[in-house]
Amino acid sequence: MKSKVLIQKIASYDLAEVEPFVRNSFDRVNRPKSLFRAGQKVLLKPNLLRAFKPEKCVTTHPVVLEAVCRALRDLSIDEIVLSDSPAFGSLKAVAKEAGYEPLVKRYGVKIVPLSNPLPLSTEENIPHLKIAGSIKEYDHIINLPKVKSHCQMTLTLSIKNLFGLVIGKRKPVLHCLVKNDKVKFGRLLVDIAKYVNPSLTVVDGIQAMQGQGPMNGTPYPLGILASGEDLTALDRVLAEILGVPLEKVYALEAARQKMFGAYELEDIELIGEDNLEALKVSGFQLAERPLDISFNPFRVLKSFLKQIYEVGIKEKLAG
């Protein structure tokens, strides 16, 4: 059976257009039996890298989150929780800047920091890998990545987004432990994705980020929403649309090596917009200055100090 990827062209963050797409995504997942049911707890995992306004395209747009919340509410989901582990700043402050606060008032969403880091043993046998044990409290995880270029991993998409479930400054340490082997780091990401196993992924590509991503790039009007259960199939289709050489999408190459999900286009069925050639874009720019996957000790220390400043000083002064 082919992996299904639902894809639609949507030019702007109009809830009237985004919400039907999300509901269609739920319908596809619910067959042949209902997956989301009344009384369950669902964790939403957007990309909340750092505190930026939505128009900067660093974070998953709040309209995509709102559409998901509306669909879950109509399914009588008991509890909707939003969480991530930002690189800089507290979850509360980053979520506020990203425009997520109205979700709390309108839909009862709880913004809860990740907790209880537990060791995760993987095939790569990388030491010190711990992932938030709190994710096991939920019946379902919905993965909500943002399409962005990435100065280290070329693109950050469905698989890469789940690295945010590694809590805090463990992330740069893990970067160093792979000794600048980007495909090895990709295999680590695949192992995390296999463990997390989100029930659904909805990819925000209406306004993507190009250039020196994942934080310092510029908006790119990709005009696409995509969803599915197979993370590899989603990332493979999006890489094809963006015209990025597959060998440079290191998480995707790792998925191919580990036979995780559907990699070959012949094993993927497009639903909605089914003409892949018509979806392809030109001019999407990757990072001009690709960086090593490893951080030098000075950069790791700088990252720790910046986080102390963001949470301990800057956020307190902002009130």
Image (cartoon, rainbow, N blue to C red):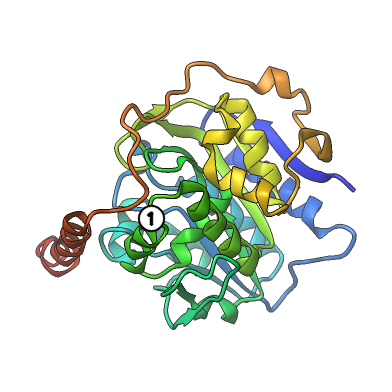
Q: Position of residue 35 (x, y in %)?
A: 78, 66
**Which part of the image, by quadrant, shows the C terminus?**
bottom left
Residue 203: image quadrant is top right
Count neighbours of disc 1 (C-alpha within 10 A) and say few if under 14, some if 14 to 19, many if 20 or more.
Answer: some
Task: Tell me: residue 227, above or below residue 140.
Answer: above
In the foreground, 304 or 49: 304
The residue shown at (47%, 60%) is 163
- Report the side of 169 relative to 146 (left or right): left
The residue shown at (47%, 33%) is 207
The total of numbered circles placed on residues is: 1
The answer to whether residue 286 of the structure is visible from this angle is yes
In the foreground, 73 or 318: 318
In the foreground, 12 or 47: 47
The residue shown at (44%, 73%) is 127
Residue 16: image quadrant is top right
The residue shown at (66%, 22%) is 279
Q: Which residue is mark 1?
A: 179
Q: Amino acid at mark 1?
A: Lys
Q: Position of residue 51 (x, y in %)?
A: 29, 52
Secondary structure state at the residue bearing disc 1: loop
In the foreground, 32 or 154: 154
Q: Position of residue 214 (x, y in %)?
A: 37, 42
Residue 75: image quadrant is bottom right
